[in-house]
Amino acid sequence: MEIEKDSELILLTEMKVKGKGIIKEINGGISVQKKLESLGLRIGKKITKVSSQIFKGPVVLEIDGNQLALGYGLAEKIKIQLL
Amino acid sequence: MKKVLLIGNPNVGKSVVFSRLTGVHVISSNYPGTTVEFTEGSIKLDKKKAKLIDVPGTYTLDPTCKAEEIAVKMIDEGDLIVNVVDANNLERNLLITQQLIETGKPMVVAINLWDEAKQKGIKIDIKKLEKELGVPVVATVATTGEGIKKLVNRIKEAKPKKNVIKSSTSDKWKKIGELVCKVQTVTHRHKTALEKFKDLTVKSWFGIPFALIILVTIFILIRFIGEGLIGYVFEPLFNWLWTPLMMYLSGLFGSGGFIHDILIGELIDGEIDYVQSLGLLTTGLFVPIAMVLPYVFAFYLILSVLEDIGYLPRFAVLVDTFMHKIGLHGLSIVPMILGFGCNVPGVLSARILESKREKFIAMTLMCITIPCMAQIAMIVGLVGSAGELGLIIVFGTLFLVWIILGGIMNKFIKGESPEIYTEIPPYRLPNLKSLLKKLWMRIKKFIGEAVPYVLLGVLIVNVLYALGIIDFVGKITAPVIKGLLGLPEAAVGAIIVGFLRKDVAIGMLLPLGLSFTQLIVASVVLAMYFPCVATFAVLVKELGFKDMLKSGTIMLGVTILVGTILNYGLSMVFST
């Protein structure tokens, strides 16, 4: 059951541009989690991906009508359930 | 005296509120991290003077980086808090509001950017919010001054809170979630054309070509405005008004002698040559005002527009991948860009970078490869007169060194480069009045700092020549200056003065009668070898003595290496 649920989640970096989803998991150490949380990125929040860059550049996403840019390495730590 | 602190998330307009409350204008822009220093001003509270402090933006009191740590420490010293909140981003902004309330200090909340939120279809019930939070809440539009009077009045109502219950961060988020549901209503509407364009500029396929067009346009504009002001305004002004006066003065002193040479300088073919004469009243005024100021003006005009529109964070996103190759992330392009105006604010702005390693790389790279506008103006004037090719070689070399040295430092300095994480503010139409004010502040600062230093530089040149010190140092350093760099011994004078003012130093190359190759080598060497004294002072403060020593060693080493390569390379190409 756990595995099946997990397979529905994709990384923020794998998401298509203009795709919408809900943050389900945030990985990484406590400092990463704190950093993301301070920007308003928390489990359960709805996001829209705005753009991604070539060569593993930052991901731009929209949350509560505001845009954030996250480096690729940070964006990889966020797992999304697509809507 | 009571201390009032302005606290809130980055880019919510704290500095604009500060300017409104104190009447003292401070630099504000549309990107997170504009304020890196604590700015102080005074306000009147109940007819008593109080100190108002603009604290650099922070998302949380549970610090995630050094800059936030410093901000948090400040709070203990404050007597009253004005928490500035972005109305467009209520939920995220309320975290720090909750944390501030838990400090028990008297506090007022200003819900800023109220107009923008209204346009976006966001409605916030201020009265309800006030009741829920238990502190006075005021809606403000700091750029126009709306609500500021009310804010001042309500500051008086702020009372210290007793028996505050501390809650965990997750509890706070839960509370905030409920609160936002109660007080905020959002009417959904379609994206405007500007918002669609906003999304486009962070997409690689559109954003990168667009950024290149912007960069080229900036170069052309700066050159056009700078040259135009020099050719049509400042040079004619000096020639028509100042020259006759100076020639008259020169006659009074008998066209020569010690005082004459200090004030007017040496006459060249019986005339004043504003670059070569090296008098306090001639070169000392002409260089900063007629040669450098026009470029400084042009640069800051364009920079201010870009800052206020909100383009810089988008540019940071686009260059992020590349910046990782030199051990930095995208946001570090911001200090680099500011460095083109003057390295001092550039170095200070590098505080937005998190790790010591990033700061070291960014500051070292900036000091070596980013000439300030004063220097650029002089190089353009001097090298440019020998053809565009010279300029391409000078700036091309600096750009290459930026990439290669950055790559090398990234390889050999231990540690990782952290990832970018930043808000991307909406595009905003610059407010003309505050834009002009910002421009004026920067120009005033330039004039106030440049003119005295240039005068001092010119004076020191005269003294050093008179005492024979330049000849002496020239002989000692000849193996490097002459042997490796292929420059005449007298060029050492420019290198000594370059520590004080780089623009004067480049001007000093003119009377040396340098060849094309020598001119290029000397310009590159002067740009790279060491920062000017003003930059050096902030660099020592930011890096500490030990890292400054390391950074300085890299600067000198790289300069000699690059200068030597350029000298031998160019001599081979241009000698035939």
Image: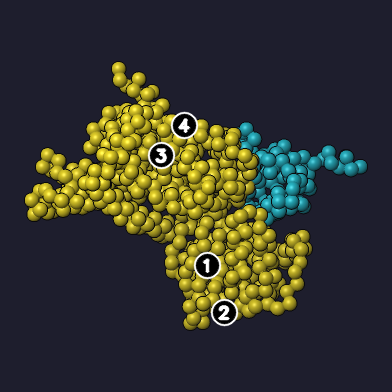
Chain colours: A cyan, B yellow
Residue B513 position by quadrant: top left
Q: Name the subunit of mark 2.
A: B
Q: Position of residue B392 (x, y in %)?
A: 38, 31
Q: Position of residue A53 (x, y in %)?
A: 62, 36
Label 4 close to label 3 by CB (< 8 Å): no
Question: What residue is shown at x 72% (from left), y 37% (from top)?
Answer: A14
Q: CA distance from mark 4 to mark 1?
A: 42 Å
Relative side of A79 to B58, left or right: right
Label 2 close to label 3 by CB (< 8 Å): no
Q: Earlier in the sequence, mark 3 or mark 1?
A: 1
Relative side of B468 to B155, left or right: left
Q: Earlier in the sequence, mark 4 or mark 2?
A: 2
Q: Name the subunit of mark 3.
A: B
For label 4, count other residues whose C-alpha is less than 10 Å away and answer few (under 14), some (14-19) or many (20+). Answer: few
Q: Nearer the viewer, residue B522 or B556?
A: B556
On the rendered image, what quadrant is the C terminus of chain B found in? top left
The amino acid type, in three-letter code, at marker 4 is Leu
Question: Of circles 4 and 2, which is in front?
Answer: 4
- Which residue in the protein does label 1 denote? B53
Q: CA distance from mark 3 to mark 1?
A: 38 Å
Disc 4, SS: helix
Question: What residue is shown at x 63% (from left), y 47% (from top)?
Answer: B421
Q: Position of residue B502 (x, y in %)?
A: 34, 44
Q: CA distance from mark 1 to mark 2?
A: 17 Å
- Which residue in the protein does label 2 denote? B156
